[in-house]
Image (cartoon, coloured by chain):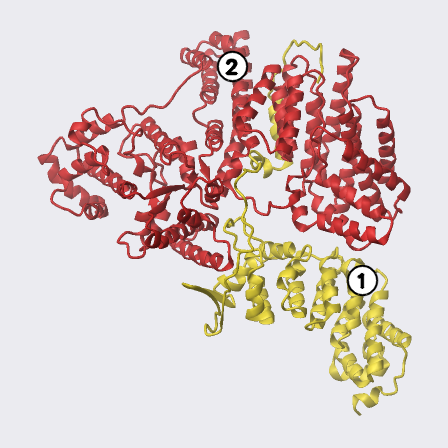
């Protein structure tokens, strides 16, 4: 019996699909009902050995109208989950199903449900992974040019639950949707800052950076990369090891590490970026008027003199210092307390 | 004289002679019409500010001014000072010395460390003085004290205090030297020279420009990578990579500039060079291995100069009296060069390749060199004496500048004589002398900070937007009822910020007036604290306010109750708090300010000192607590009133203010703070407690805020934070869609990432601005 025969009797409306998905996933996850949770797809779940793959086979077997209803139903169930810890596992399962059956409608509910809501928060009750899984889901649904995926990613990046650990996944997904938009993606509020944080704080050995560099280059290619380089905030002549430009760690991973996908060569008149694995594939960096803002030095701006000296002292140290000072001052025995005016 | 002895003198002389060679080439270049620009490394700044550490040899490195073995340490330090003075004040005439990025940052770090040490030194000296005073009194009053032991301890304290008062060594002395360098703008980044038209030559100007377009930045990066690899090999892996990267960037920039200069030399014929003065051993080692184009010289020989290269320059050493006849100076060889050549020539006759023979000599091992000089001990028995005599003649004028104040001399005498009673005589004057010293150090730094000389060191990127001149926060309104100079100073600070600042000399004069009016130091530290608050340096402001408060409590000067110091410190601590714990001291300070106000009023009934400020600040403090809670998820004490209760108190305070008889600008400043706080409170309640926005009140208070901004004078421009609230209010109350869209656009543009970065002062500010932006962005308002 092929799958279409198995599922052809299913003639449900959206509400029925929604109930089917809700009851099915809850029984499957919370009551351990196994494939029986989805009676109409049980044989497919059994055969594929996985709920998500079974439901994919099921979706493939119904007609387009019902398939769309099923996809919508997944989105709606996800959106209607009550903010309770027990539903975290249900949400996870729904995300996996969404990827499996390409349920694009979830892209419209994820930002509200997980971006800012209960499910995306990170806490010891097991919700830590859900936001990351959401990003993964969106990334999987992010095909070139898909505006709903782009909007969803942008909203997730701006959401309250977006953490630095999610930055590189979000950037890669954004590049998948819009491979010419690297500069614009990095300019999304908070993304660049969180990406730097992820690289500098949590990626001490540079493996994440390197993976991101390889992925991004594989997605966007030479032409988009070369054009982005002109607008990235990087390689400032004023930068130093401690005060790098914001995009320096990304550019280091792309070009300057022994494991980078690319390498840079100064060929006198031209500067060339080539594949490290195959120097025959390269692009020449275009000569273009500089977009880097060069600070004006005519009028010296006011600058910290003493601030730095105390900036890295904790306020407690500061207090101790001041207390130390205060405890050593002398009390004068006489004073003229008259005429006090300030 | 032993072989070993002579060998080390020969090596020292040869080393020194080798350091002088590149300088000879510089003189030839200048004689041919070329021009030199001098860049300096951080270690040279340290040689200037801290010669007692950098000049002598240490176990780990060679001293920058220890030329011959067994030198008198005082001579070594004095020579270090003389070399540094020559480099900074004479070598490049009116042109500042160039500091190549990111060395400015390194100097900045050094400065940071020095100023912190200076602060600690002050604390130590004051503690020492406290103990010293106690001991003196104890020794005089109690007969059972062991006189010998007391004298010994007293001498120890006295020596520490004398050293501090002498102001020649130690962190405070270093800080003052820094102040001097920065004040005279003796170091500046290359762009400063271009922008201030200090270099006329087009070729030089173009070469000094930083690489800004992409291809150039990439090329520059490749140069930096190459220098990094070379330096890492020389310095070894455990060495701090941050420092290696900095050095690599400096050498890359030096190479970048000189490549451009040499490239255009062929076309235009002008000969310019930029040389880096440094004593960094690894830099030399790395640069010596780099061949430069077709030149027979290495990169090090061409573009690096050791500070000792300037030993023969006028004013550093005194020429021996008979030098003119023995070594008539030529245009390229100094008398000192010739003297060394002659002396070394006696050892090593018969070679034309001078540089080569020096290298050969220096490459000899200790043992080889000893064997090599052995015959000379018999053939020329006076050779070493001849050198040391001439050298002491060269160094005869080098003495450390020691100008002891009379009080320090009295202290030293008392210490030497060990008589306790003599200490008693000086003790009161001593306290004053210490206070003066502390104040002098601050004075020097302050004028530099105020004028902005320090900013010459590092580039401030992204400072071109129109909001750059808007203060992130405005300083608190301080009220001085009778101290007119102090009032003037405050006004000057406020005006100075608007008009582009005063010069260091003008600031000096303003400070002089402050000191004249109130000699206790209270007004001085308070004025400075206010300045730093106006400049949004709240931590510094808090330290200075605390110093003023300490003077008020310790010395109880006339006309001073400490009211304003307690208030300023409260405001400064609130602005600089990194966590909720940091806020805990503030309530007490506000209580203190209020109590002082009550005392002041008891003494002088007509006093107008705007006590409502304290209440407004208290309410602002409560909101700060709630912002820590909502924006940073911090736990706050139960004693903090709820947002609802704060809102009620703010309304009351605004009403009370309307009938206030205080001066107009004081009332307006407090009103502005209350209105902003009220708006922030309702917005927080809106999101945190789901309380609907009180639209009618919002309209009334927005009107009041706009009116306030229009009416206020005296240099109090609205801060970024106040403007943000005003714009949010405008958006909230926009009557139709068109105006709403325009207001929304205005808020979104105003709250750009750059502005948020630039104007975030409090720990939670960035989060708060993002929160406000989101309200606008998500069309919640």
Crowding around mark 1 (Cα neighbors within 10 Å: few <14, some 14 to 19, many 20+) is: many
Crowding around mark 2 (Cα neighbors within 10 Å: few <14, some 14 to 19, many 20+) is: many
Q: Chain A hue?
A: yellow
Badge number at residue B430: 2
Q: Nearer the viewer, residue A52 or B141?
A: A52
Q: Name the spot of residue A215 as percent of width and height, x first.
A: 59, 69
Chain on which label 1 sits: A
**Label 1's element?**
helix
The label nearer to you, 1 versus 2, is 1
Q: In which quadrant of the rendered image does the N terminus of chain B lie?
A: top left
The residue that appears at 82% across and 78% down in the rendered structure is: A68
Q: Which chain is red?
A: B
Residue A55 lies, with reference to residue B402, above or below; the image says below
Q: Nearer the viewer, residue B518 or B459?
A: B459
- Cα separation, mark 1 vs mark 2, equals 70 Å
**Label 2's element?**
helix
* Residue on which the image places disc 1: A113
Residue B601 lies in quadrant: top right
B600 relative to B397 in the view: left or right? right
Residue B482 lies in quadrant: top right
The residue that appears at 42% across and 16% down in the rendered structure is: B404
Asked whether residue B113 appears in the rendered view, the answer is: yes
Q: Do dots 1 and 2 share one subunit?
A: no
Residue A148 lies in quadrant: bottom right
Q: Name the spot of residue B551 as percent of width and height, x first.
A: 63, 19
């Amino acid at each position: 019996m092929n799958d279409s025969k198995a599922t052809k009797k299913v003639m449900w409306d959206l509400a029925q699909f929604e109930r089917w998905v809700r009851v099915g996933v809850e029984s499957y996850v919370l009551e351990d009902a196994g494939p029986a949770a989805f009676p109409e797809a049980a044989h497919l779940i059994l055969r594929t050995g996985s709920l998500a793959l079974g439901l994919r086979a099921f979706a493939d077997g119904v007609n387009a109208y019902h398939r769309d209803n099923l996809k919508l139903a997944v989105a709606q169930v996800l959106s209607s989950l009550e903010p309770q810890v027990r539903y975290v596992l249900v949400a996870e399962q729904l995300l996996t199903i969404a990827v499996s059956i390409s349920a694009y409608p979830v892209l419209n509910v994820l930002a509200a449900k997980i971006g800012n809501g209960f499910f995306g928060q990170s806490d010891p009750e097991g919700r830590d992974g859900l936001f990351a899984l959401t990003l993964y889901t969106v990334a999987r649904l992010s095909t070139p040019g898909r505006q709903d995926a782009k909007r969803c990613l942008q909203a997730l990046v701006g959401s309250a639950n977006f953490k630095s650990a999610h930055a590189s996944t979000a950037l890669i997904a954004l590049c998948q949707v819009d491979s010419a938009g690297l500069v614009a993606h990095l300019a999304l509020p908070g993304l660049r800052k969180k990406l730097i944080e992820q690289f500098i704080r949590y990626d001490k050995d540079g493996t994440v950076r390197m993976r991101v560099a390889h992925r991004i280059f594989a997605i966007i290619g030479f032409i988009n990369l070369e054009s982005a380089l002109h607008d990235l905030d990087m390689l400032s002549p004023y930068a130093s090891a401690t005060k790098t430009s914001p995009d320096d760690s990304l550019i280091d991973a792309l070009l300057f590490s022994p494991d980078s996908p690319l390498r840079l060569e100064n060929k006198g008149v031209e500067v060339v970026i080539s594949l490290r694995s195959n120097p025959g594939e390269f692009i020449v960096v275009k000569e273009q008027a500089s977009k880097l803002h060069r600070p004006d030095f005519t009028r010296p701006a006011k600058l910290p003199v003493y601030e730095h000296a105390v900036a890295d002292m904790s306020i407690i140290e500061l207090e101790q210092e001041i207390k130390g000072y205060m405890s050593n001052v002398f009390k004068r025995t006489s004073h003229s307390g008259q005429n006090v005016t300030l | 004289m032993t072989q070993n002895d002579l060998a080390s003198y020969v090596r020292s002389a040869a080393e020194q002679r080798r350091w002088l060679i590149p300088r000879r080439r510089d003189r030839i270049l200048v004689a041919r019409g070329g021009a030199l620009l001098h860049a300096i490394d951080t270690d040279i700044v340290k040689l200037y500010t801290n010669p007692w550490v950098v000049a002598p040899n240490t176990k780990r490195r060679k001293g920058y001014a220890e030329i011959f073995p067994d030198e008198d340490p005082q001579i070594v330090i004095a020579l270090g000072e003389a070399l540094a003075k020559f480099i900074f004040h004479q070598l490049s005439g009116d042109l500042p010395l160039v500091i190549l990025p990111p060395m400015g940052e390194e100097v900045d770090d050094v400065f940071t460390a020095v100023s912190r040490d200076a602060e600690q030194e002050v604390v130590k000296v004051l503690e020492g003085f406290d103990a010293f005073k106690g001991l003196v009194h104890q020794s005089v009053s109690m007969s059972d004290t062991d006189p010998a032991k007391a004298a010994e301890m007293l001498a120890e304290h006295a020596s520490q205090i004398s050293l501090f008062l002498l102001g020649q060594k130690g962190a405070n002395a270093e800080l003052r030297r820094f102040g001097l360098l920065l004040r005279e703008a003796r170091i500046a980044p290359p762009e400063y020279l271009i922008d201030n038209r200090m270099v006329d030559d087009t070729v030089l100007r173009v070469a000094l420009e930083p690489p800004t377009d992409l291809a150039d930045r990439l090329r520059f990066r490749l140069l930096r990578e190459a220098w990094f690899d070379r330096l890492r090999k020389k310095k070894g892996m455990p060495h701090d990579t941050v420092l290696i990267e900095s050095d690599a960037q400096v050498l890359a920039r030096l190479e970048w500039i000189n490549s451009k200069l040499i490239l255009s030399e062929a076309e235009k014929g002008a000969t310019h060079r930029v040389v880096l003065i440094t004593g960094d051993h690894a830099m030399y080692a790395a640069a010596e291995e780099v061949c430069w184009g077709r030149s027979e010289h290495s990169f090090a020989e061409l573009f690096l100069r050791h500070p000792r290269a300037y030993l023969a320059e006028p004013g550093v050493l005194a020429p021996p009296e008979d030098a003119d006849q023995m070594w008539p100076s030529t245009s390229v060889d100094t008398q000192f060069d010739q003297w060394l050549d002659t002396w070394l020539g006696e050892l090593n006759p018969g070679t034309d390749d001078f540089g080569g023979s020096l290298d050969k000599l220096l490459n000899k091992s200790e043992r080889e060199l000893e064997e090599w000089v052995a015959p000379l001990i018999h053939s020329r028995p006076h050779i070493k004496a001849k050198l040391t005599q001439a050298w002491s003649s060269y160094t005869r004028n080098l003495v450390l500048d020691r100008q002891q104040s009379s009080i320090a001399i009295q202290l030293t005498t008392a210490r030497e004589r060990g008589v306790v009673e003599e200490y008693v005589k000086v003790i009161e004057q001593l306290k004053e002398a210490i206070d003066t010293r502390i104040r002098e150090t601050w004075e020097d730094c302050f004028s530099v900070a105020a004028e902005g000389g320090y900013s010459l060191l590092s580039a401030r990127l992204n400072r071109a937007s129109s909001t750059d001149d808007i203060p992130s926060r405005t300083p608190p309104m301080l009220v001085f009822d009778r101290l007119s100079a102090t009032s003037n100073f405050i006004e000057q600070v406020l005006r100075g910020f608007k008009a582009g600042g005063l010069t260091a000399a003008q600031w000096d004069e303003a400070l002089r007036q402050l000191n004249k009016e109130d000699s206790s130091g209270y007004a001085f530290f308070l004025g400075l604290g206010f300045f730093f608050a106006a400049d949004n340096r709240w931590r510094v402001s808090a330290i200075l306010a605390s110093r003023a408060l300490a003077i008020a409590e310790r010395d109880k000067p006339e006309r001073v109750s400490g009211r304003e110091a307690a208030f300023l410190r409260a405001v400064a601590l609130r602005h600089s708090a990194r966590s909720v714990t940091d806020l805990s001291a503030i309530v007490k300070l506000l209580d203190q300010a209020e109590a002082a106000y009550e005392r002041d009023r008891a003494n002088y009934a007509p006093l107008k000192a705007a006590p409502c400020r304290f209440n407004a600040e208290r309410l602002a403090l409560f909101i700060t607590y709630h912002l820590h809670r909502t924006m940073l998820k911090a736990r706050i004490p139960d004693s903090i009133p709820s947002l609802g209760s704060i809102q009620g108190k703010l309304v009351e305070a605004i009403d009370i203010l309307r009938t206030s008889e205080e001066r107009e600008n004081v009332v307006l400043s407090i009103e502005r703070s209350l209105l902003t706080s009220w708006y922030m409170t309702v917005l927080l309640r809106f999101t945190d407690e789901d309380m609907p926005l009180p639209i009618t009140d919002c309209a009334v208070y927005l009107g009041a805020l706009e009116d306030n901004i229009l009416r206020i004078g005296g240099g109090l421009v609205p801060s970024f934070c106040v403007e943000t609230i005003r714009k949010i209010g405008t958006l909230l109350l926009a009557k139709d869609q068109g105006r709403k869209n325009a207001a929304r656009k205005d808020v979104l543009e105003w709250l750009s990432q750059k502005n948020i970065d630039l104007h975030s002062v409090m720990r939670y500010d960035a989060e708060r601005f993002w929160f406000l932006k989101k309200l606008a962005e998500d069309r919640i308002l």
